[in-house]
Image: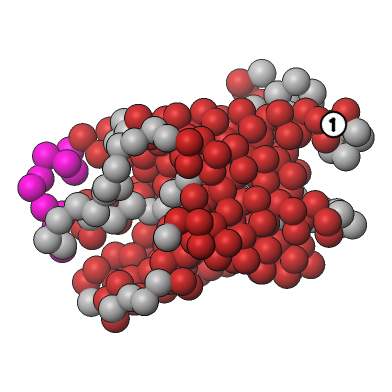
Amino acid sequence: MLESLPIEALYGGILIGLSAALLLAFNGRIAGISGILYNLLFNNLGSYDRSWRLAFLIGLFVGGYALLPVEFELREGYSSVLLILSGLAVGIGTRIGNGCTSGHGVCGIGLLAGRSIVATITFMSAGIITVTIMRMFGIVG
Amino acid sequence: MNRVIIALISGILFGAGLVLSEMVNPVKVQGFLDLFGNWDPSLVLVMGGAVAVTLVTSRFILRRKTPIFADRFYMAMTSNIDARLILGAVLFGTGWGLSGYCPGPGIVNAMINPAEAIIFIPALIIGGYIGQKFSA
């Protein structure tokens, strides 16, 4: 089974890890996308605090754009209601839980932060349960 | 200025990693979360690769008293494992499963699958704003 796994997934993961390491080593900051986004949008920041977050988000698009087009088939006709519920739940959850896959999953676990390990196990489990239920209703799979 | 350039480079690496690893494909992410169905284990490599790097590098980085360009490390101010953390993670994980998008891939999808991003991103921002109200 392992031979059939795409090696690009590993390379991509390493790039994400290096991104987080760079930001921590030089700027002392956590590469948590949700935190960066919400601070930029909702908090009154000084000019430097706004600039680096904006630069990071611009970089996100530049780096992604450099590797387009994607090779997978785009999903079409997915339920708008599910997309809205998903966005709301991800938004509320990452704000009150202080982090998402990047902040807790990649950075926090790397720092061996107990909070992040618990959060990651919890959101992974919730995601697995959600998809399992959706499968029972024939929404995915 | 140095720190803004570092943030830009960090963002570029992150965005490239998301596309290269196919984290931006929500169908693949849902396949990864479909542990009891048609499980697609390839995203284990993404998380594994990323965490392997941060586990090793963090040890060296935190040996320094300060970051290279900044006066201190900005870490979470609390180590509490409380109801907020758990409730937040449950909500986030549920939302992640519903669409296959977490915040990073959801945002980058503005240039990959704009038909979905135009719905997901505003909902994400509204959700974040609601969460912010509960965080105050």
The region drawn magenta spans B60-69
Q: Residue furthest left?
A: B65
Q: Where is residue B82 in the image (x, y as percent from the top left)?
A: 42, 35
Q: In this view, does A136 lie above or below A49?
A: above
Q: Which residue is drawn at 48% across and 45% down?
A: A97
Give residue A28's quadrant in the image: bottom left
| Dot 1: element | helix
Q: Can residue B57 be seen in this view?
A: no
Q: Residue at x 73, y 70 (%)?
A: B118
Q: Where is residue B76 in the image (x, y as percent from the top left)?
A: 30, 47
Q: In this view, does B96 lie to the left or right of B45?
A: right
Give residue B130's quadrant in the image: bottom right
Q: Name the residue under label 1.
A: A135
Q: Is residue A16 left or right of residue B128?
A: left
Quarter holding the C terminus of chain A is: top right
Question: To which chain does the residue with label 1 belong?
Answer: A
